Image: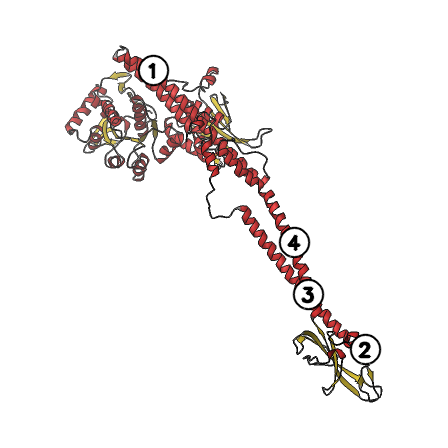
């Protein structure tokens, strides 16, 4: 999952970014509105965290600019103002949820997970496709109720594929949403990760959850249950 | 000069020390170039009065002059008839006038009344004794039987009224003769009359004008007295000598004074609230600060420090949130426009749909038009936002919103009733009491600081003197009802 964080307070921004990275997100950070607006328009962002009180372009204007340009990724606003009038203004500008400062990191993470899941059309925090279930809150996968031990990257790949279950996800997309801009990219790594996932989720080779579309990418092909 | 005298007084809205206000009163008011109300009214009324009296006087003068002139003419005409009646005809059929005339003035020289008779050929055949050596330029008589009347003068310059009258004298047997009778009278008595009339007319008018002006000034003073009183009372309020304007004002001013009083009371309440808020904030921050200090000074482990820090920071955060929300609420400001409730609810429902997108909540809206709230829109948004947020947090899938206007028996103004129901688990008896206390949340695992309902109560009950009721509604969940 690729997160864009726009926050002018450097210390808070670094803390959020560090925590999000630790949770396995690919994170881009911006310290002001215009840079943030640019990143949101140029990068394949899955979800954005926007502080409303930015020094140059206000967070509200950044969101309006994205929405005006047709970018529909979910946006979580951070605001120091806790009045409903301000929250409603932010939500009407195009944000999807709000969080009043100061907040707890766990709360931020839960809101982000929910936003990503919701924008992919999932109503509940546990994604179920046939026997495979992915608990996005606990970051655990299970097959027939049995927990499957996944590495951080394996989890990221599975989460992205399951969120977009039924859709073909190109290798490029998958790479962009999992790795940060400056990370080393190698499509062989992706193949290795997918191969490992197949082995762990489907040791008997009877489910075949991830199919390879030659030249186009991967598709998680089990039916969504939620 | 010291302003410390004000410190322990009741809050003075236009806070100035009494001394400052006093010295202000000694100073002349700045000239604004705009004339005062009383001088405007006085000036306008005086101009109207002068114009009215002047025009009336001129008209009366003119009418009197005209009628006096007409009377002079009638008198001359009467003299003509008197002469004719006295005239005799001699044996040749010619006109003759006796020496003894009925009008004595004609016989005495310099009497001011003159008469003469001209024959057809223009030859003077008779002239009165009074007109000897007096030469008057009479008007020519154009037609027989029609008098010609002019104002003219004698050769010596005395102004006279002159009248010429042509007659045909028919003898009993002989031929008829034409004569021209001419009479004139000095204008002296006429001028005297006019002068006397004018003197008395303008004398009375001047007296009337003076009386009217004095009356008018008194009326103005009496009529504008309430305005002067308002000004005086406002400066008393400024100086802190009184809290509000008096009640007994004429109807036209009562709205103004009532609104001013409402503004003053509003400002005073606001000030008091900020003061209380600051006091509360300071006091409630002192405890966690003390805890932190003690913990920092002691030999607590890093883990203990971490826990204490987090607890106290949470506590301080709740305090700051609560006090800020309280302070931001502005209350019913006098003179503010009523707020339409429907768009506020629409926006909030739109926001709730986004925030609680997972639950796909059904909102039943029953709004009775026109739903208007007399107060601040941000306060209404805050109240309804908090209640709706709670309802959405707890509901299963339905939230019902009902808005009505209710008029209580004995209450002058209709009030706004908002009732919000959810189909969640509802409230326990104890919840109803504790939820309204600041910082209490019904469930620790749901988002929110538990300040919501406390802030709602603060705004509804303290700021708007409304009512807040918590109960369990027909949907099975909680019902929050407010009357504003």
Mark 3 or mark 2, which is nearer to you?
2
- Give the Cα distance between marks 4 and 3: 20 Å
Q: Which mark is residue B194?
A: 3
A25, above or below B38, in the image: above
* Mark 2 residue crowding within 10 angstroms, few (<14) / some (14–19) / many (20+): some
B110, above or below A43, in the image: below
Q: Foreground: B443 or B326?
A: B326
Are labels 3 and 1 on one chain? Answer: yes
Question: Which of disc 2 and disc 3 is earlier in sequence?
Answer: 2
Q: Chain of mark 4?
A: B
Q: Which residue is mark 1?
A: B290
* Mark 3 residue crowding within 10 angstroms, few (<14) / some (14–19) / many (20+): some
Question: Which of disc 2 and disc 1 is earlier in sequence?
Answer: 2
Assess whether mark 1 and mark 4 are in contact (beta carbons under 8 angstroms).
no
Q: Which residue is mark 4?
A: B207
Q: Chain of mark 2?
A: B
Q: Foreground: B146 or B399?
A: B146
Assess whether mark 1 and mark 3 are in contact (beta carbons under 8 angstroms).
no
- Give the Cα distance between marks 3 and 1: 105 Å
Q: Which mark is residue B101?
A: 2
Q: Position of residue A103 (x, y in %)?
A: 32, 23
A41, above or below A17, in the image: below
């Amino acid at each position: 999952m690729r997160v864009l964080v726009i926050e002018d307070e450097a210390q808070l921004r670094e803390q959020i970014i560090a925590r999000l990275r630790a949770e396995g997100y690919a994170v881009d950070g911006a310290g002001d509105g215009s840079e943030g607006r640019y990143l949101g328009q140029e990068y394949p962002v899955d979800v954005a965290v926007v502080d409303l009180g930015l020094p140059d372009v206000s967070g509200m204007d950044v969101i309006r600019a994205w929405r005006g340009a047709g970018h529909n990724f979910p946006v979580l606003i951070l605001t120091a103002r806790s009045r409903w009038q301000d929250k409603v203004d932010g939500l009407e500008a195009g944000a999807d949820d709000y969080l009043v400062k100061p907040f707890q990191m766990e709360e931020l993470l839960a809101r982000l997970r929910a936003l990503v899941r919701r924008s992919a059309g999932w109503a509940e925090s546990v994604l179920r496709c046939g026997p495979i279930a992915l608990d996005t809150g606990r970051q655990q996968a299970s097959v027939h109720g049995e927990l499957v031990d996944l590495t951080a990257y394996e989890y990221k790949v599975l989460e992205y594929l399951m969120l977009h279950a039924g859709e073909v996800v190109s290798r490029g997309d998958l790479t962009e949403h999992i790795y940060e801009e400056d990370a080393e990219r190698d499509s062989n790594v992706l193949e290795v990760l997918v191969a490992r996932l197949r082995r762990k989720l489907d040791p008997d080779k009877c489910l075949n959850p991830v199919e390879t579309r030659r030249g186009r990418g991967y598709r998680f092909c089990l039916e969504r249950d939620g | 000069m010291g302003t410390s005298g004000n410190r322990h007084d009741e809050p003075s809205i236009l806070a100035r020390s009494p001394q400052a206000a006093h010295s202000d009163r000694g100073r002349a008011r700045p000239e604004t170039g705009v004339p005062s109300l009383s001088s405007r009214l006085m000036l306008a009324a005086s101009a109207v009065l002068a114009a009215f009296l002047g025009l009336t006087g001129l008209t009366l003068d003119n009418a009197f002059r005209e009628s006096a002139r007409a009377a002079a003419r009638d008198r001359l005409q009467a003299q003509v008839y008197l002469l004719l009646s006295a005239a005799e005809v001699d044996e040749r059929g010619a006109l003759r006038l006796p020496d003894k005339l009925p009008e004595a003035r004609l016989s005495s020289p310099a009497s001011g009344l003159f008469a003469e008779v001209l024959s057809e050929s223009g030859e003077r055949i008779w002239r009165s004794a009074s007109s000897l050596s007096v030469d008057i330029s009479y008007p020519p008589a154009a037609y027989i039987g029609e008098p010609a009347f002019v104002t003219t003068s004698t050769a010596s310059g005395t102004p006279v009224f002159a009248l010429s009258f042509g007659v045909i004298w028919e003898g009993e047997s002989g031929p008829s003769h034409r004569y021209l009778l001419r009479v004139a009278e000095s204008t002296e008595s006429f001028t005297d009359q006019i002068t006397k009339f004018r003197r008395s007319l303008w004398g009375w008018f001047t007296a009337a004008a003076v009386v009217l002006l004095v009356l008018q000034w008194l009326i103005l003073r009496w009529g504008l007295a309430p305005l002067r009183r308002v000004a005086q009372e406002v400066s008393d309020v400024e100086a802190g000598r009184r809290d509000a304007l008096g009640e007994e004002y004429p109807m036209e001013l009562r709205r103004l004074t009532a609104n001013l009083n409402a503004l003053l009371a509003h400002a005073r309440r606001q000030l008091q609230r900020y003061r209380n808020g600051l006091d509360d904030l300071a006091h409630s921050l002192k405890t966690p600060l003390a805890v932190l200090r003690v913990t920092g000074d002691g030999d607590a482990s890093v883990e203990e420090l971490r826990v204490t820090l987090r607890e106290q920071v949470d506590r301080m955060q709740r305090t700051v949130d609560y006090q800020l929300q309280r302070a931001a609420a502005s209350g019913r400001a006098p003179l503010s426009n009523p707020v339409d409730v429907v768009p506020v609810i629409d926006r909030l429902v739109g926001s709730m749909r986004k925030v609680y997108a997972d639950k796909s909540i059904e909102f039943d809206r029953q709004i009775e038009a026109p739903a208007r709230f007399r107060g601040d829109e941000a306060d209404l948004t805050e109240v309804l936002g908090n209640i709706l947020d709670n309802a959405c947090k707890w509901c299963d899938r339905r939230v019902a919103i009902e808005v009505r206007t209710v008029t209580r028996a004995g209450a002058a103004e209709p009030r706004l009733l908002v009732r919000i129901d959810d189909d969640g688990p509802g409230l326990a008896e104890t919840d109803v009491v504790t939820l309204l206390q600041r910082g209490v949340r019904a469930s620790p695992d749901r988002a929110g600081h538990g300040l919501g309902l406390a802030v709602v109560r603060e705004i509804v009950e303290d700021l708007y003197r409304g009512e807040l009721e918590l109960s369990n509604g027909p949907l099975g969940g909680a019902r929050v009802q407010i009357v504003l």
